[in-house]
Amino acid sequence: MPMGYRMGLVAMKELGVEREKNHRMFALTEMGEGHPNTCMNDGIQASTGCTYGKLLMERLSYGKFAFVLYKPGKGAIRVSVKPDFIDVVAKHEFSSLRKSGVEPSEIPPGVADAIVEIVLKAPDSEMFKVERVPGFRFERPAARFNRARCSKCGEYLFERYARQVEGKTLCIPCSGFVESQLNVPKGGL
């Protein structure tokens, strides 16, 4: 989590922006699911203000230790953790314990504190690769408050998610239809 927090700070500094208070900046994390470093996303949310709850964070699921911070009019910055720094962290006792299945809260405080200190004291240049992403665009669908009611389950949903099947309005789960709502470049960044 501290590593993600620092990633967010570095990206904001590079873009020349402050923590997002409204809905005008986006974090697109390249981390995926099923690996122990997804807590980096918590740190990115805490430092940037781009949270899942405000729909300002998206998971690209590339399985990488990286994210893109995008602010329309300011551009996009990609911050990735350097492989050499990942190697340093991977050799630490904390990582060995996590790999063996020990939950973070069950790791002795001295071990956890030591890894946090490494992450907090390392120079940005040792930890991160920072790069501008020219021409990057990300657009969220415009907010609409119109709702519809699913003919099958009876629950309300926002109209944009309604699917028409055999003349009936259905929610996505009832229709069986799945579609990505992300508008990011295909094939990676």
Image (tube, grey):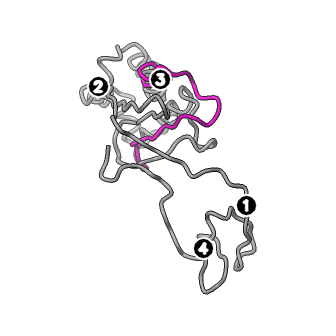
* Residue extent of the magenta highlight: 11-35
- SS under mark 1: loop
* Helix, strand or loop for disc 4: strand
In this rendering, the label closer to the viewer, 1 or 4:
1
* Kind of residue at disc 3: Met
The quadrant in which residue 96 appears is: top left
Closer to the N terminus: mark 4 or mark 2? 2
The residue that mark 4 highlights is: 163
The residue that disc 2 covers is 85
Q: Secondary structure at mark 3?
A: helix
Element type at marker 2? helix
Mark 3: few/some/many CA within 10 Å (<14, 14-19, 20+): many
Image-based side of 136 in relation to 171, left or right? left
- Evaluate if marks 3 and 4 touch, with contact meaning CB atoms under 8 Å apart: no
User: Mark 1 sits on what residue?
Assistant: 146
Name the amino acid, label 1: Asn
* Foreground of the two, 184 or 98: 184
Q: Residue at x 37, y 36 (%)?
A: 66
Which amino acid type is shown beneath numbered disc 2? Phe
Earlier sequence position, callout 2 versus callout 3 = 3
For marks 2 and 3, give the one nearer the viewer.
Answer: 3
Between the residue at mark 2 and the residue at mark 3, the CA separation in whole angstroms equals: 21 Å
| Residue 12: mark in rendering | 3
Per the model, the C-alpha gap separating discs 1 and 4 is: 14 Å
Label 2 neighbour load within 10 Å: few <14, some 14-19, many 20+: some
**Residue 104 image offset from top left, x and y in percent:** 49, 34
**Is disc 1 surrounded by few (<14), some (14 to 19) or many (20+) residues within 10 Å?**
few
